[in-house]
Amino acid sequence: MPDTATDYLIAIALTASLTILCVGLHYEALRLISAFHPKRLSGKVNIGAMILLIIVAHCLEAMVFSMGYWLGSDVFGIGELQGMRDHGVIAYIYFSLETFTTQSIGDIFPVGQLRLLASVQPLVGLMLIGWSTSFTFLLMRRDWRVDERDDRY
């Protein structure tokens, strides 16, 4: 069955909604992480906790996109992911994580209008990872101090 204008509109709306949701989620995650600054812990422990929390935030954002692939495929029927033996939750999360990080091994690929979502997700992932990188730099500059007794970090 050929793609309809409605399929394109659904793909655009789904892609825009997930992008906005992930940007908002990332903003809130970084805001909360920057507020997390226990004075009793060393700067190095704070940096380690921050890195782990940022990784969790990125995984959650990729899971939001995986929900979009499921919605597009199983609910709206605007495309599908091919190459998956199992169309379960883990397969959608796997594809989303590899797309978010631009790894894209190619063992799973989108067809139909899900290609729009799979084309925009790496751009969103790169932007959010870049945002996390600059955020990490700023916090490390603030918290990561050289131990004056011995030149180690």
Image (tube, rainbow, N blue to C red):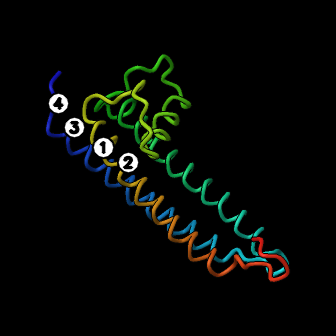
Q: Mark 3 to mark 2: distance in Å?
A: 21 Å
45 versus 1 height, above or below: below
Mark 2 lies on residue: 122
Which mark lies nearer to you, 4 or 2? 2
Precedes in sequence: disc 4 or disc 2:
4
Label 2 SS:
helix
Q: Residue at x 64, y 81 (%)?
A: 142
Mark 3 or 1: the one toward you: 1
Vertical placement of 28 versus 96: above or below? below
The answer to whether the residues at label 1 and label 2 have Cβ atoms under 8 Å apart is yes
User: Pointer 1: what residue?
Assistant: 119
Q: Residues within 10 Å of mark 4 (few under 14, many from 20)?
A: few
Residue 91, percent across and down? 51, 28
Callout 3–callout 1 Cβ contact below 8 Å: no
Real-space Cα distance between discs 4 and 2? Answer: 24 Å
Among the 4 quarters of the image, the one containing residue 68: top left
The mark nearer the N terminus, 3 or 2, is 3
Q: What amino acid is at disc 3?
A: Asp
Instruction: Name the residue rendered at 34%, 27% in the picture.
Output: 80
Horizontal and vertical percent for residue 34? 63, 75
